[in-house]
Amino acid sequence: DGGITQSPKYLFRKEGQNVTLSCEQNLNHDAMYWYRQDPGQGLRLIYYSQIVNDFQKGDIAEGYSVSREKKESFPLTVTSAQKNPTAFYLCASSIVGGGNTGELFFGEGSRLTVL
Amino acid sequence: RKEVEQDPGPFNVPEGATVAFNCTYSNSASQSFFWYRQDCRKEPKLLMSVYSSGNEDGRFTAQLNRASQYISLLIRDSKLSDSATYLCVVYSGGGADGLTFGKGTHLIIQP
C-alpha cells in the first residue's frame, strides 16, 4: 500500500543530543514537509521540500535541519540548538504544481521527549 | 499574517444530535479550504475539501462563505466515533508553504 512511514514512533533523548527522525513515502509525491504539533496548538511548519536536493525553511526552522537526497526520503534532525524539542512531529507529502490543492498525506507521527 | 481561527471547544454533544462549527480566515486571497480530522495522539486525516457551492458527504456538510471569510462543518446524527479534533486548513497558494492550519475544535460525542 502507498503511504508515508515515520520512525521511530516514540523517542526519548537527553538534553544536548541530536536526534534524527525518519520519513519515507512511496506515493511518488514531489513535496514533503515536517510539522511540529504542541498540545492545544495548530501544526507549525518546520521545513519543506518541493524537489530533490532543495528545501526551504518554514516558520520555526531554528534548531532543525533536513536533507532531501532522494524523492522518497526527507529526514529531520532535531539538534541540541532546539530549545524546546519535546513535541509531536508529523511528516507529510503532497503533489506539487497545478494539481496541488493543498491536500496533505501524513505519516503517523513521531513523539519526541527530551529528558 | 495569515490566520485561521477556530473555537477550541470542547463541544460536548449527545449522540444523535447535530453539531456545527465554524472557522474564520484572514487572507481574502485564500484559494482552497479543507477539514481534517485528528484523533487523539494520531496524525490528521483529510475529512473533506470545501467547495464554493458547498458539499456533502454522508452525514457531513461543508460550506464556504467567501464574503464573510469563514467555512463551516455540520455533522448530522452524530456518532460516538465522531469524537475527535477537527482542523480547519486554508490554502493560499504560493506553493508548498501556502497552507495554514487552525488549532482545531475538539468534539466529544456523549452516549
Image (cartoon, helix red, strand yellow):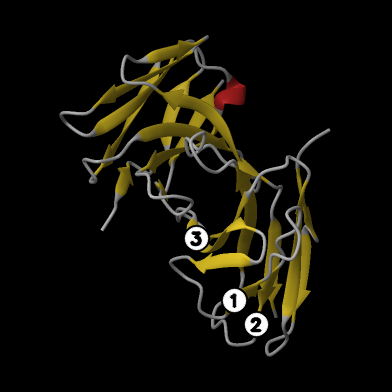
Quadrant holding the C terminus of chain A: bottom right
Q: Nearer the viewer, residue A62 or B95?
A: B95
Residue at image position (38%, 40%) is B90
Residue at image position (49%, 10%) is B77
Q: Which residue is mark 1?
A: A64
Residue at image position (39%, 46%) is B102
Residue B39 at x, y percent in the picture: 61, 39
Q: In the structure shown, which secondary structural element does the residue marked by tag 1 occupy?
A: strand
Which tag, 2 or 3, sits closer to the chain's start?
3
Q: Chain of mark 2?
A: A
Q: Nearer the viewer, residue B98 or B102?
A: B98
- Reply above or below: A94 against B3: above
Q: Are marks 2 and 1 in contact (CB under 8 Å)?
A: yes
Q: Chain of mark 3?
A: A
The amino acid type of the residue labelled 3 equals Leu
Q: Disc 1 and disc 3: Cα gap in Å?
A: 11 Å
